[in-house]
Image (tube, rainbow, N blue to C red):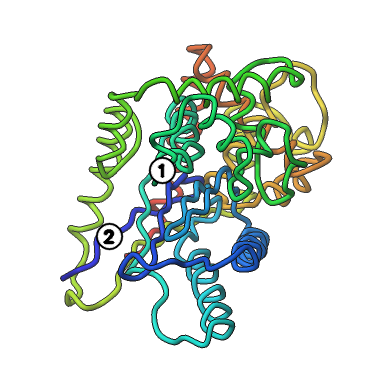
Amino acid sequence: MPRHLRVEFPGAIYHVTIRGNARQKIFNDDHDRKRFLQRLADSVETYGERLYLFCLMSNHVHLVVETPSANLRKFMQSLETGYTVYYNLRHDTCGHLFQGRYRAKLVEGDEYLLKLSRYVHLNPIFVGSAKSFELKERIERLRNYRWSSYRGYIGQDKPLPYVKYGALLAQTGVKPRRQALNYRQYVEDGLAGNDEEFNKILKGPTIGGDAFCARIRAAWQDLAGKVAQPEDIDFRYRSPTLESQTVLETISRHMRMPMGAFRERRRNSLLRPMAAQMLLKYAGLTNRATAVLLNLHSGEAAGIQARKAQAAQKQDKQTQCLMEAIEGDLRQHVSGQRKY
């Protein structure tokens, strides 16, 4: 049976699920869980991913990860292979630990990412005996569950350096001091009832609105039409990336600003926010590399700048038109170097 082709592009966000072979446990004890998280942290650092969420269950794992360099396959191969080697050595086993190929659904950002985060973090109280707990017991179990990113989000644990909390917390309130409390309330409100509409979306191949799903479906069909390989060949489309100079020159031309302005702080200017967003998306840079190029103080600052551009695009029609024009030119550059 042929493998389902996977659409990959810079800045794609995926909900990844990996399961134990034949539903077997993939964690025997806390030492295994700690080792998996260490491997996860190492792989995130090595491949420049943005990890938003994780939840470790006894026989499966949920991850929500963004791939600025369109390299999900390499990231997951590193994570799964490294942990499997460790597990087999420690427990004197051999063979496959995970059930076939990991599942990865593309996710639209903003509200869909926020709703997905609630679903992922609520996993520990939707399994086994916890499903029959009273509300107070379920809240206690959720807040005390050590093997997900939830405690870091609500301020009960120190933030993990390999998890990016800002994008989701920013959607829950403007004041940083209130964000953790607001997020906790948002997630725990989900204990009272199911979001039936979002549950239906979760069952589909893509998590997002109609327009987003249509774009991904069209990309998949375009990709499938270009496959001229036997069914037993593992074929994936590799999205080319542009040189950062090309990206900045395109933005500079549209905004009529000198190239040196990208490294300058300008109040109320969208120059650096647009540059951050386009460098992450089209040049495949990590947040850290983008920060260096734009003279920002940290990788997190680059992510904030990119989100600022996204917000401005939604709020202002003129900004939206400008960014669409810039992206149109960048896509032409990509098309000019694309190979299948």
- The reply to whether callout 2 and callout 1 are in contact (CB within 8 Å) is no
Closer-to-camera residue (76/224): 76
Q: Is 132 placed above or below 289 here? A: above
Q: Nearer the viewer, mark 2 or mark 1?
A: 1
Q: Is 73 placed above or below 122 here? A: below
Q: Is 327 placed above or below 149 here? A: above
Q: Position of residue 289 (x, y in %)?
A: 72, 51
Crowd class of label 2 (few under 14; some 14 to 19; many from 20; radius 10 Å): some
Q: Secondary structure at mark 1?
A: helix
Circle on res. 129: 1
Q: Is residue 165 left or right of residue 264?
A: left
Circle on res. 5: 2
Residue drawn at (74%, 40%), measured in percent from left and top?
Answer: 157
Closer-to-camera residue (277/185): 185
Residue drawn at (54%, 77%), measured in percent from left and top?
Answer: 87
Q: Position of residue 100 (x, y in %)?
A: 32, 70
The mark nearer the N terminus, 2 or 1, is 2
